[in-house]
Image: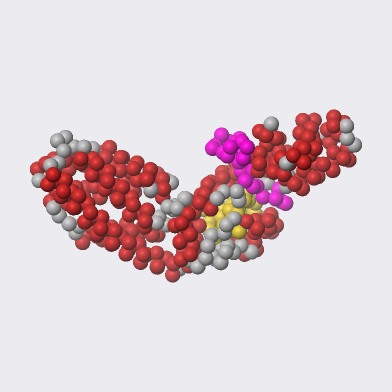
Amino acid sequence: MKERERIRQRLIADPGVIATVVAAVREQVPAYAVLDDSRLNEVRAIAAWALDRLLQLWVTDGALTPADLRRFRGIAAARAADGRPVQAVLRAYRVAATVLTDEIAAATPPPGAPDAFALARMALTTLDTLSEEMATAYTATSDDLTADRDRALRLLLDDLIAGRHASLGALTDRAARLGGQLPDPYCLLVAEPADADGAEVTQETAAGLLSSLGGHGGGLAPLVTVRDSRAVLLLPAAAGASAPRALGERGLRGCAVSGESPDRIAVAYRLAADAMDTAPAHAHHPDRVLTDGDAQVLALLGGRPAAAPEQISRLILGPLRQPGRRHLMDALTTYLDTGSANAAARRLGLHPQSLRYRLRRIADLTARDPRDPWQRLTLDIARTIAH
């Protein structure tokens, strides 16, 4: 027992042990890799308490007390409320137990065989008990949340855009429990008042916007929430086409991202939210919303991590990159270089009307009018990258 106590005191006194536990959990459990600083502080506090209790149980050959079980059940209930999957939570405890075992084995001198067997027995017994208790509490809390379906759907979208999920499979299972499936392909729309003096966006505002868009994803009730005073809606991709009209009717403007995969909805949200934060006023137009291409260009201009250059070129230029439309790409390049349709026509040896017709075709194919200042900038950046 003295050797066990010596090892316990050394580990408790070493802050590096908790750091190693948290780092291992974040590396091996995807749901923990995306947590922000406030939640990581909670993880560190729980890890410190659990480490201390496990070491005490090992030193005393003890077992979890009713107070311990109540605390573990409370942790499980909190994870159900914030959307972290129970499988991820239990895996985090297994990872932590493995790190603890490795730290004890690395002690100098290492524990003898009887102490090592006692450690293994304690770890297995404790993990088995807390797994059952936490799974039960998690399920009960999840059932309560599911009973309040509107709130459960809002929490689902909150968790999606925050990246609080273990895997695409876990998301699919959670959506199925709520009676449907996530839209795939999807459009993530972030909207805010077009006028700085506009009415504050509320949950009711967001729900009304979604209703006008006809958003209903694959049998799952509409997913809508409010984040940072903006409406956030998860729609089937086809519903995004009516976004400009619906936003305009309510005095809103927005950014719609649809090019990210279902397991990267958090990335789509960050792209859209950053675009809304940084887009100049002239980037917004009553007849269109910002798209993936605009968001990627803004990320590039702002020095934030963006897609590969060829991704920006694909999003902005789209069909113009096809070999059969080389004449349109030449018309765009010349127009951007000269600054006017007449000058571009002269350089290409075309009638000005022919050049203007090609510009209209470019606008039809890319949904970007080269005569609009912001859209011209995005086209210019994309063709520069393409070349």
**Residue at position x 40%, y 44% from top?**
37
Residue 194 in the figure: left or right of residue 25: right
- Residue 303 at x, y = what percent? 56, 34
Q: Residue furthest right?
A: 351
- Residue 39 at x, y = what percent? 38, 48
Residue 88 in the figure: left or right of residue 325: left
Residue 146 in the figure: left or right of residue 67: right
**Residue at position x 58%, y 39% from top?**
307
Residue 331 in the figure: left or right of residue 191: right
Q: Which residues are magenta?
A: 285-311
**Residue at position x 50%, y 68% from top?**
179
Question: In the rendered image, which quarter contains the C terminus?
Answer: top right
Q: Residue furthest bottom?
A: 147
Q: Is residue 82 magenta?
A: no
**Residue at position x 58%, y 53% from top?**
188
Give 163 or 192, whichever is nearer the viewer. Answer: 163
**Relative to 63, residue 329 above or below:** above
Q: Is residue 297 magenta?
A: yes
- Residue 216 at x, y = what percent? 59, 64
Q: Determine which quarter of the picture holds residue 361.
A: top right
Q: Determine which quarter of the picture holds residue 128.
A: bottom left
